[in-house]
Image (spheres, helix red, strand yellow):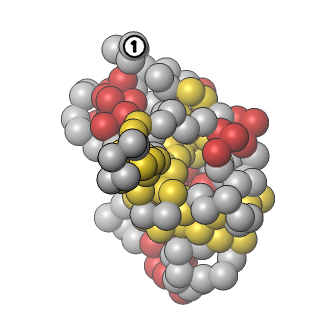
Amino acid sequence: MISDVTVEANHGLVVTAEHKRQMTEQMSNGYILMDPRFFLDLTTNSQEERLKMMSDSNTATLDEYNRTAQAGESVTPPFLQILCDGSQPGKVSLYDGRHRACACIKANVNVLPVFLIASFGGQVRWRMEKRLTGRPTYEYRYVDASDFPSIFIGKYLPISRNIDMSTWVDIR
C-alpha cells in the first residue's frame, strides 16, 4: 500500500506518495539514489547541453521543486527506463528529471532519487508466454533491483556509469 506521507526528504529532492502512485502506474516498483551528475551524463547528448541546462535561469530551485511536490501537484519524479535484455549494460531508453538533477547540483546535493522502469525487449515489465493455445499472452511480473544491470549506458552518448543498486527503495 502506498503511504500518503512524504518520505526520504533527507536526500534533497523529496519523494511523495503522489510520486509513488505515478511511478506504480508507469510500472516502476522502486527507486535508487544516484549522483545527479551521472543522471545528466546518461540523459544529455553533449557537455555543451549539460552546461546550458546548468546555466538556465528558468530552472526552478530544489526548494521550489520540493514545495510543488509537497503541495500535491502532479509532477513526474525523475526516472530512467532501462532496456534489460539480460546482457550488461542496460541502455537508457526513456527519461525525465534533468532539470531536477540540475537543481540538486546547484544546491550541492549529491544524491537524486531516480525511479527505474525495466523494459524487456520492448515489453515494459511484462513477460510474453505461450499458453496451451499456442497464442502469446502477457503476464505481469514484479521487477526489483536484481532485474537491472549494474552498468547503464546513456541514451545519446556511449557513456557508461556503474550504478549502486544497493540503494534500491521498494515502493510496493
Q: Residue at x 59, y 58 (%)?
A: 84
Q: Is residue 145 left or right of residue 44?
A: right
In this rendering, the answer to whether 165 lies above or below 84 is above
Q: Residue at x 37, y 52 (%)?
A: 134
Residue 161 lies in what quarter of the image? bottom right
| Helix, strand or loop at mark 1 | loop
Q: Is residue 157 left or right of residue 5?
A: right
Q: Residue at x 37, y 34 (%)?
A: 24
In this rendering, the answer to whether 150 lies above or below 45 is above
Front residue of 55/9: it is 9
Q: Residue 68: horizontal and vertical position, in percent?
A: 29, 36
- The reply to whether residue 41 is visible in this rendering is no
Q: Residue 112: horizontal and vertical position, in percent?
A: 58, 45
On the image, numbered disc 1 is attached to which residue? 1
Q: Residue furthest left?
A: 73
Q: Residue at x 32, y 64 (%)?
A: 58
- The reply to whether residue 167 is visible in this rendering is yes
Q: Residue 140: horizontal and vertical position, in percent?
A: 41, 37
Q: Residue 63: horizontal and vertical position, in percent?
A: 42, 39
Front residue of 58/134: it is 134
